[in-house]
Amino acid sequence: MAQEQTSQSVAPARLVIHNIGLLLSGDIGRPILDADTVVAVNGKITAVGKAKDLDTASATIRIDAMGTTLAPGLIDSHVHPVAGDWTPRQNQIGWIDSYLHGGVTTMISAGEVHTPGRPKDVVGLKAMAIFAQRAFSAFRPGGVRIYAGAPVIEHGMVEEDFKDLAAAGVTMLGEVGLGSVKDGATARQMVAWARKYGIQSTIHTGGPSIPGSSLIDQDIVLATDADVIGHINGGHTALPDDQIVALCEKSPRALEIVHNGNEKAALLTLRTARELKHLDRVILGTDSPAGSGVQPLGILRMISMLSSLAGVSAEVAVCFATGNTARIRNLDCGLIEPGRVATFVMIDKAQHSPGKTVLESMQRGDLPGIGMVIIDGTISAQRSRNTPPATRVPEVVKQ
Ligand SMILES: [Zn+2]
């Protein structure tokens, strides 16, 4: 089901969600809000607070949260889409819709590198990036918003190419290092050109992912100075511990931890970021589809893994996949506050998890159950077909 903008509707679409048991803001400075009600008009949040203090009348969609937890929709900071909801990596169809049932409402392409016959000449790679940006802007599998069109830099590109790409609507580079540019000096120059024209960058970090790709070590990452240290825990093979620690300490850039990486290195990264008081730099991705497949619950699994093993609370771990990513990626989602898009995931403790609350269950390493996903003020999924069943699920009172 593709999402359509509602700007042409006559009466405003007014969503009211009440009886929220716990409201996770996505903001790492204040991860839990003292609120039980969210109001959104035409897909944008207009009010957050206590029901008794808000105007909750004249809803066109009214949802009783039934005491469940509302959080911003999850953002997967690192995916490799190709075309629509098909991936050739494991030859699967419908993979993005499956992630919707894992609470993911926004995806960011780290390069459409699995495209069969991917062009590597400059004109071809620019054309492919512009095509992907256009195609995924116009098509949202399950309603999931996909930011795509992320060219992989190759030798021969000049400043004018980055200017052209930006003018054509391209806003980010694919993983630096997956193309022919693997030396720090060239990569740094191209990343600087990209930045000059408002294009964000990510670098592959660690050993080669598949035959044909190569090692990108600490020195190349630091020299390149991309905006995001992509999969700092490897994708799949991680750098040695001392290099991971050095990247956390010496670079001010975002620290991206991925599901397809080394889990021990993920924990090292998180502990180092915590010691440095740099948890606001941590963002999460799956780096999927990949050799290890498609992981619809990958972001939820990382939140539970990090909060159970790395000594951060579950509400903070949720921020790694919501507000942190939105801030670093300049997105209009990821936080529960007026003006943001009304894009939410509603969760509860999974049935029979021994934790007393949903947060405690996640801190024990269990996944939460998803009861509803809302994108731009519209219900995109109800009880998830992929998570363990939530104990309680929201009810649609009026629609
Ligand atoms: Zn990579």
Image: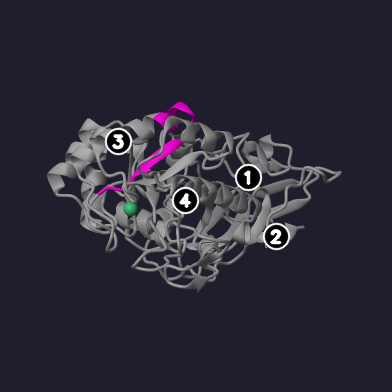
* Closer to the eye: label 3 or 1: 3
Residue 179 got which mark?
Answer: none
Instruction: Give left or right: position of 120 versus 330.
Output: left
Q: Which residue is mark 2?
A: 396
**Residue lying at 27% horizontally and 63% vertically, measured from the top left:** 211
The magenta stretch spans residue 212 = no
User: x, y (%) of residue 21?
Assistant: 54, 51
Q: Which residue is mark 1?
A: 342
Q: Would residue 16 be found to the left or right of residue 31 on screen?
A: right
N-terminal of the two: label 4 or label 1? 4
Residue at the extreme right of the image, as rendered: 10
* Cβ–Cβ under 8 Å for marks 4 and 3: no
Q: Earlier in the sequence, mark 4 or mark 3?
A: 4
Amino acid type at mark 2: Val
Q: Residues under labels 4 and 1: Cα distance?
A: 22 Å
Residue 159 percent across, percent down from the top left: 43, 30
Q: Position of residue 266 (x, y in %)?
A: 26, 51
Q: CA distance from mark 1 to mark 2?
A: 16 Å
Considering depth in this image, is 315 or 5 the residue closer to the camera? 5
Query: How dense is the environment of label 2, judged by Cα within 10 Å: few (below 14), some, or many (20 and up)?
Result: some
In this view, the residue in front, 53 or 168, is 168
183 vs 160: above or below: below
Q: Which residue is mark 3?
A: 186
Q: Residue 263: x, y in percent? A: 25, 57
Q: Which residue is mark 4?
A: 109
Of 114 and 180, which appears nearest the observer? Answer: 180
Q: Which residues are magenta?
A: 193-205
| Kind of element beneath mark 1 | loop
Cα separation between marks 2 and 4: 33 Å
CA distance separating discs 4 and 3: 22 Å
